[in-house]
Amino acid sequence: MSHVSVSEPGLDVPALPLSQLAPWAFFGVLLAAVAVFFVGAEQGAFSLFTGTAVHEWVHDARHLLGYPCH
């Protein structure tokens, strides 16, 4: 019985400088903050738009995340 040795190729993970990662991290945090605002606070005390259009667009997301809406 012969034994076959399989060697796995090395995985080279490139270093990513913080200066290249920071703008994308900032954009991601900003996008998440805007999403949380529209799901949780819009149509409330800090409303940017009048009417209930935004509320209706994110209605199910409010329920899913536990925000009271009615």
Image (cartoon, rainbow, N blue to C red):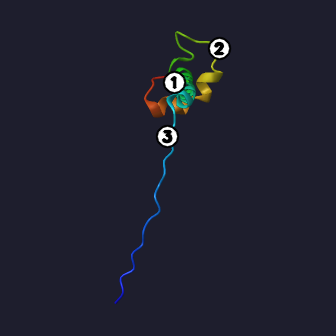
User: Which residue is tagged 3?
Assistant: 15
How far apart are labels 3 and 2 at the CA level? 44 Å
User: Which residue is tagged 2?
Assistant: 49
Q: Residue at x 54, y 29 (%)?
A: 28
Q: Residue 70 location, x and y as percent?
A: 49, 22
How far apart are labels 3 and 1 at the CA level? 32 Å
Q: Residue 61 location, x and y as percent?
A: 52, 32
Kindly state the secondary structure of the residue where label 1 is placed.
helix
- What mark, if any, has residue 70 been given in the picture? none
Q: Nearer the viewer, mark 3 or mark 1?
A: 3
User: Which residue is tagged 1?
Assistant: 36
Q: Residues within 10 Å of mark 1 (few under 14, many from 20)?
A: some
Closer to the camera in the image, 40 or 13:
13
Closer to the camera in the image, 58 or 69:
58
Quadrant where the N terminus sits is: bottom left
Query: Residue flagged by tag 3: what amino acid is it?
Result: Ala
- Left or right of residue 65: residue 27: right
Whether label 3 touches label 2, CB < 8 Å: no
Of all residues, the one furthest to the bottom in this rendering is 1
Q: Residue 19 location, x and y as percent?
A: 54, 27
In the rendered image of this protein, does residue 51 appear above or below residue 66?
Answer: above
